[in-house]
Image (cartoon, rainbow, N blue to C red):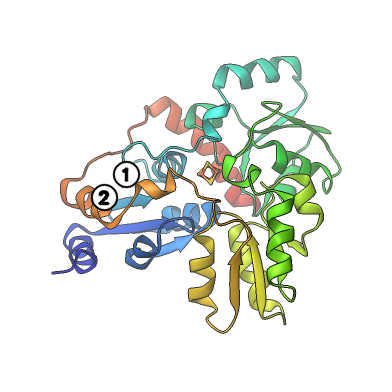
């Protein structure tokens, strides 16, 4: 039996659901029950009736699923699949910034550890960051860990944004350079360019639209354009092409690859399901504190 079919059979036997991020390899996206961005996956995790959640993504996503479902078994499909950007913010650093700016609200990107989330007022994703920041009661907002997303939000929200840490970044988006996009535009002169808000400001400036991965799908769906250059992780193109086969999608940079997302193959998903390995474990105290900012985000959006 093919691995894909065995995985689907195991899901049925074990009452499990597979949630996969848009940056997963095509075979994993095809084997999943649901594919989406961080916000969509958090909502799915909140609403699932399944006994077990297998997360094909990175650590903070599986942690978020656990925070929303403390009574369920949540597995991270691949060991060591961690988000480098999330690891750039340490709880001590955030606690220090809070002490220095006691009147500021704290908004954290979901790409952060549960320990950091426990210190936040609200979480956000790249799809809702502006809305969340504007909903905060303070004039100043501590925002982390992605500096480019902080700059994107500061241009749109009427709040003072203080990035924490000062220079957090996603290497996948930071290394999509202006020259890559200009080259893609030369190759595909009729294509619209959609950038992710984690891209550098100079790349965002030449974009026809900026949005999270879920927003990229909506923008492409609603646009009359037939071709798009996509400024995010390379495998997002697979998701877009699958959903919109009549349009054409090109990666802005063919080397924009998240190595942690690529740790998951069908073998890892199968093994996690079969052996119930890499279970997410969080202390009760952290679960209680870190769940609140996620629930607040979900209630605002
Ligand atoms: S693409 Fe960037 S932000 Fe997303 S998981 Fe990979 S390192 Fe983290």
The reply, left or right, for residue 186 in relation to residue 213 is: right
Query: Does the Cβ of the disc 1 residue fall within 8 Å of ligand 1?
Result: no
Placement of the N terminus among the 4 image quadrants: bottom left
Q: Which mark is residue 119?
A: none
Mark 2 to mark 1 CA distance (whole Å): 6 Å
The reply, left or right, for residue 280 in relation to residue 217 is: left
Please say if 8 is above or below 70.
below
Instruction: Identify residue for label 2.
Output: 268
Placement of the C terminus among the 4 image quadrants: bottom right
Instruction: Identify residue for label 1.
Output: 78
Label 2: element kind: helix
Indicate the position of residue 102 as horizontal and vertical percent values. 74, 19
The mark that comes first in sequence, 2 or 1, is 1
Q: Nearer the viewer, residue 11 or 234?
A: 234
Please identify the residue farthest to the left as the structure is shown. 1
> Is residue 134 at all visible to an observer of this figure?
no
Indicate the position of residue 279 as horizontal and vertical percent values. 28, 39
Is the C-beta separation of discs 2 and 1 under 8 Å? yes
Please identify the residue farthest to the right as the structure is shown. 158
The reply, left or right, for residue 51 in relation to residue 24 is: left
Please say if 5 is above or below 144.
below
């Amino acid at each position: 039996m093919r691995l894909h079919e065995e995985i689907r059979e195991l899901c049925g036997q074990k009452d499990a659901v597979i949630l996969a991020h848009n940056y997963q390899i095509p075979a994993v996206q095809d084997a999943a029950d649901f594919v989406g961005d961080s916000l969509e996956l958090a909502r799915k995790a909140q609403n699932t009736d399944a006994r077990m959640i297998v997360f094909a993504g990175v650590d903070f996503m599986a942690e978020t699923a656990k925070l929303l479902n403390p009574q369920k078994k949540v597995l991270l499909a691949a060991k060591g699949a961690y988000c480098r950007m999330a690891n750039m913010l340490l709880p001590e650093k955030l606690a220090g910034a809070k002490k220095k700016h006691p009147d500021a609200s704290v908004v954290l990107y979901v790409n952060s550890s549960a320990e950091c989330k426990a210190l936040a007022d609200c979480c956000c994703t790249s799809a809702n960051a502006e809305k969340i920041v504007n909903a905060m009661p303070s004039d100043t907002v501590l925002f982390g860990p992605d500096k480019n997303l902080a700059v994107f939000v500061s241009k749109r929200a009427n709040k003072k944004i203080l990035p924490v840490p000062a220079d957090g970044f996603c290497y996948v988006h930071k290394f999509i350079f202006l020259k890559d996009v200009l080259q893609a535009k030369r190759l595909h002169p009729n294509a619209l360019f959609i950038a992710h808000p984690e891209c550098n400001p100079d790349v965002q400036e030449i974009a026809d639209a900026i949005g999270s991965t879920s927003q990229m799908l909506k923008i492409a769906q609603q646009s009359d354009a037939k071709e798009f250059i996509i400024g995010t992780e390379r495998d997002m193109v697979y998701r877009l092409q699958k959903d919109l086969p009549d349009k054409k999608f090109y990666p802005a940079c063919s080397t924009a690859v998240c190595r942690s997302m690529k740790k998951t193959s069908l073998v890892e998903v199968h093994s996690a399901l079969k052996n119930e390995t890499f279970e997410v474990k969080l202390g009760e105290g952290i679960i209680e504190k870190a769940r609140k900012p996620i629930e607040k985000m979900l209630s605002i959006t």
